[in-house]
Image (cartoon, rainbow, N blue to C red):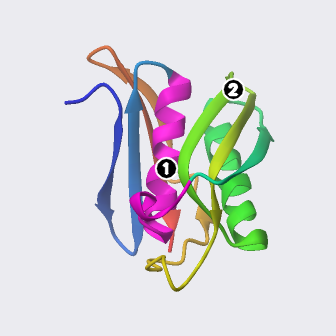
Amino acid sequence: MTTRGWEHFEVEADVGVRGWGDSRAAAVAQATLGVFALLVDPAEVEPREVREVRAQADGPETLLVAWIDECLYVHDIEGFVVREVEMTVCTDTLAHGLLRGEPLDPTRHRVGTVVKGATYHTVALTVREGLHEARVIVDV
């Protein structure tokens, strides 16, 4: 297994995303990228612009859901698609980061699945075999 990455996993009627990395921030960033990959393949996106995103919550798992939803809000309102995610702050109650990408261009980007939002169902932030993991299920 690589030190950073993301993958989708099967969930009845929805899609699960698991991100991992050498820190919680890296795992959350990878999970976020995995969610955006449902919308448009990140390899098709140029990191031309930056969007700043911030979320707050009562605890780490609720923060992960709030963070994903805030990132999806940027996509929903601006049609922004993402190539890279950088977490600048990732505590138990505060997430702040940068989304690098560009506005959706249907002539260049193959549009994938519509993602409605993150769910609280089995959301988890864990450490396994020395790697941090962020797991979230998104409603599609």
**Which residue is pictured at 56% across the width and 26% down the height?**
25
Q: Residue 41 location in percent, x, y?
A: 41, 64
Instruction: Examine the structure image and report whether residue 69 is included in the region drawn in magenta.
Output: no
- Pointer 2 or 1: first along the chain: 1
- SS for dot 2: strand
**Which residue is pictured at 46% across the width and 32% down the height?**
27
Instruction: Examine the structure image and report whether residue 29 is included in the region drawn in magenta.
Output: yes
- Classify the position of the N terminus by image quarter: top left
Q: Type of residue at label 1?
A: Leu
Q: What are the residue bounds of the magenta stretch?
A: 24-46
**Which residue is pictured at 47% across the width and 69% down the height?**
40
Q: Type of residue at label 2?
A: Thr
- In the rendering, which numbered label is found on residue 33? 1
Q: Residue 51 location in percent, x, y?
A: 75, 50
128 left or right of 25? Answer: left
Pointer 2 residue: 88
- SS for dot 1: helix
